[in-house]
Image: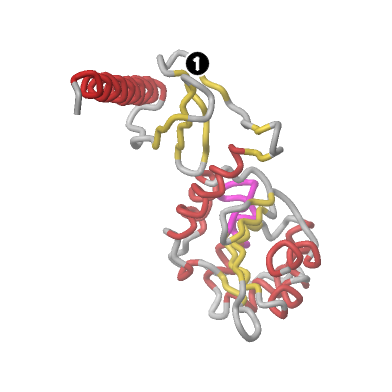
Amino acid sequence: MNPISIGKQLSLSMIILAAFSQVNADEETIQKKLNQLIPNALAANIKESVIPNLYEVSLGAKIIYMSGDGQYIVNGNIVNLDTRENLTEKALSKVRKTALDKLSANSMIVYSAKGSKKRTITVFSDIDCPYCRKLHKEIPALNQAGIEVRYMAYPRAGVGSDAYKKAVSVWCAEDSAKAMDDAMTKGQVVSKTCQNPVQKHMKQAEMFGVTGTPNIVFDSGKMIPGYAPAKELIKLLVH
C-alpha cells in the first residue's frame, strides 16, 4: 500500500474518531443537564437523531429532543415529509414495547383469547370512565378474534377517590375478572381491601405517558390514547 493511501486511511480514521468523541461529549453534556433538571433521575437513553446536533432522549416511555450543548429542549414529533413517517412515534413504540416486556401479567386482570392467541393489548382503565365501560363490553369480540386483553388500573381521580377504591375492591376480589365484569356492566362493586397493585399501576401509567382512559397499548408498542371499537382494533391487530 502506498503512503498516500495509508495517509487517507489515517485521516478518515481520525475524522471518525473525532466524530465519536464529539457524540460522547454531547451525550455526557445532555445527561448532566438532565441531572440538574431532574435530580436523582435514572440515566437516559441518548442517541443521535436524524437532525444534526439534535439528540433523541428516552426517559422511561417518553421521548424528548435536546441540542448537543444541552441548552435547548424540543418536545414534539419528527416527521419525514418524503415518507410521511412519524419517526418519533416509531421510536416511542420501541420504547413502549421494551417497557411492556418488563411488566408482569400476574398483577393484571386478564381476559384470555379464545383458541390460539394472536395478539395482546394492555389497557389502562378507570371503572368510572364511560368509554372504558363501552370498551369492556367489546372484550368478548376481541377475545373471539384471538386478542388477549390485559387490564391495568388507572383511576384518573387519584389515590383515595371513589374510582380508586373501586379499583382496589375489584383487584382484591376472589374472582377479579368477574368483579370487573360486574363493575363495568352492572355498576356493582363489593367493597374489599388487601395488598394490591393499583398504586403501582398508576405509577407505571405515568411512565407510559398515560393521561386519560381507556389507554390501549398494543404488544408492538403502538398506543391508542382513547376508545377504539373492537372492529377497528381487530382490523389493526390481526388483519
Residue 22, quarter of the rendered image: top left
172 on left or right of 39:
right
65 up-or-down from 222: above or below:
above
Question: In the image shown, does 178 or 119 lie closer to the viewer?
Answer: 119
* Number of on-image labels: 1
Magenta range: 153-166
225 on left or right of 27:
right
Task: Identify the colour scheme used.
Answer: secondary structure
Q: Is residue 164 magenta?
A: yes
Which residue is tagged 1? 72
Please state the horizontal and vertical placement of residue 27, each as a whole percent of the image. Answer: 35, 25
Q: Circle 1 sits in a helix, a strand or a loop, which is it?
A: loop
122 up-or-down from 208: above or below:
below
Give me the residue at 46% from left, 26% from top.
55
Residue 10, quarter of the rendered image: top left
2 on left or right of 170:
left
Furthest residue in direction front, as rendered: 2
Please state the horizontal and vertical placement of residue 201, each as a whole percent of the image. Answer: 51, 55
Question: In the image shown, does 130 or 50 lie closer to the viewer?
Answer: 50
Q: Is residue 174 magenta?
A: no
Please state the horizontal and vertical placement of residue 96, each as a whole percent of the image. Answer: 52, 50
Which three-letter amino acid code belongs to the residue tagged 1? Answer: Tyr
Question: In the image shown, does 30 or 91 lie closer to the viewer?
Answer: 91
Give me the residue at 69% from left, 69% from top.
238
33 on left or right of 193:
left
